Amino acid sequence: MSQETIAQILSIEGIAVQLYGDARQEAERIVKEAKQAASTTREQTLAHVRQQAERLVAESKATAEIERDRILAQANAEAQQMEALAEQHMEHAVSHVLAQVVGRE
């Protein structure tokens, strides 16, 4: 084998080693960027999910407060009706007791 052939082989080998090193560095860079992108996407997704959860909790609280207010208003209305009915019955009961007392004397 001639010196020139050996020099060409060594040159090609050197180029191959350089290409392999470059490819390895490029692969490492791509993997690093992919990991960073995945991490960023994960953080963004978690932030979005947290915001949705907070919004749902706030909506649930608002709905619960509205329902509570409706129930309280209904209970107050029913209590007023019961009081009015009790007053009507009280007048009848007092009249009945007075009639009984007056009738016994």
Image (spheres, rainbow, N blue to C red):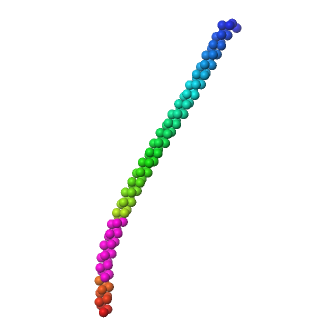
Residue 76: image location, x then y, percent: 34, 66
Q: Is residue 69 above or below residue 35?
A: below
Q: Quadrant of the C terminus?
A: bottom left
Residue 53: image location, x then y, percent: 45, 48
Residue at the (39%, 55%) spot, across then down = 63
Q: Magenta residues?
A: 75-94
Relative placement, left or right, of 17 versus 72 is right
Q: Is residue 70 above or below residue 105?
A: above
Secondary structure that dominates the magenta span: helix
Q: Is residue 85 above or below residue 56?
A: below
Q: How many marks?
A: 0
Residue 16: image location, x then y, percent: 62, 18
Q: Quadrant of the N terminus?
A: top right
**In the current view of this chain or complex, which residue is farthest to the bottom?**
105
Magenta stretch: residue 80 in it?
yes
Residue at the (55%, 28%) spot, across then down = 29
Snapshot quadrant of residue 82: bottom left
Snapshot quadrant of residue 100: bottom left
Residue at the (37%, 62%) spot, across then down = 71
Relative placement, left or right, of 14 versus 88 is right
Q: Is residue 99 above or below residue 90?
A: below
Residue 68: image location, x then y, percent: 39, 60
Residue at the (31%, 73%) spot, across then down = 84
**In the current view of this chain or complex, which residue is farthest to the right?**
1
Magenta stretch: residue 82 in it?
yes
